[in-house]
Amino acid sequence: MRRLVLSISGLVLAMTVFTAIFAAPVRNNGPHGPDKVGPKIAVTAHADLVAAGASGIIVFSHDGGINWSQAKKGPSFGFFDLTDNGRGVLVDVGGGAIYRSVNAGNSWNKMVSTTSTDLWSIKYDAPTKKFVIVGGDHSGKPLLLYSTDNGIHWTKIEEDGYQRLTLATDKKGHLVMGGVGRLLKYSTAGGNTWNNATSPPPYHAESIRDIIYDGLRFLAVDDKGLFFHSTDGV
């Protein structure tokens, strides 16, 4: 990802697709109420669904999301993100803690995270077979962690700069992260080393809030609601 450009049309497209798919939502069986589940949901290798939220509750579904059951795990804390490796291993992260499941989210074991810093986003980089986590504390100190043994052990990477908030992968060897201070970096080394992406001219946003890969390019949105996309596919 060498160069990014501002895109407003992406917002219109995203809203159109969302309306077409979710015009008539159906409320299914499961825990309800503020922060009970969400904001993150993952699909496992066997098409099971797992969701986690700010209250620390994890729920799973074996029937496509119609019915949900609460998972067994350790002490409650807020979960910010979860992902899987496509081979049955799920990893969930939150306020300095990492939990791992090998049975489609039914039960979870706490891993040694080597940090108490908030962990905001996690992705699995298939080409290097690594889980990669980004995070940071409220003072702005950044954090990067990676695991090469399916989330059992974690190694910390020291990085200067701003707090990391979001992470995305194209599952082809490219990782992109964003954060406070309009941070945008990319890695082709499984998160071991990072390079600065060339971003648009300065504006008044304070941080990159989310990044996704749509199958063709990376898309990013900042805290002012502006959208960006990569122009070289990475």
Image: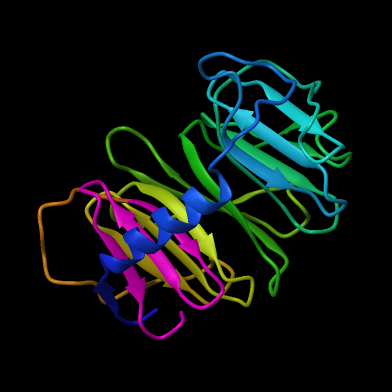
> Which of 147/12 is in front?
12
x%, y% of residue 221?
32, 56
Residue shown at 57%/51% (left/top)? 21
x%, y% of residue 210?
40, 52
Q: Is residue 186 magenta?
A: no
Q: How many marks?
A: 0
Report if residue 218 is visible in the image.
yes
**Vertical comparison of 165 with 93: above or below:** below
x%, y% of residue 91?
70, 43
By what rule are the colours in the image chosen? rainbow
> Magenta residues, as a range?
209-234
Residue shown at 33%/46% (left/top)? 163
Report if residue 152 is visible in the image.
no
Q: Is residue 169 left or right of residue 16?
A: right
Residue shown at 33%/60% (left/top)? 12
Q: Is residue 219 magenta?
A: yes
x%, y% of residue 4?
29, 75
Which residue is at the far bottom? 232
**Vertical comparison of 59 with 217: above or below:** above
Residue shown at 28%/41% (left/top)? 140
**Vertical comparison of 170 with 168: above or below:** below
> Which of 90/159 is in front?
90
Can you say which quadrant of the picture contains the N terminus?
Answer: bottom left
> Which of 184/65 is in front?
65
The quarter of the picture where residue 61 lies is top right
Q: Is residue 151 left or right of residue 117?
A: right
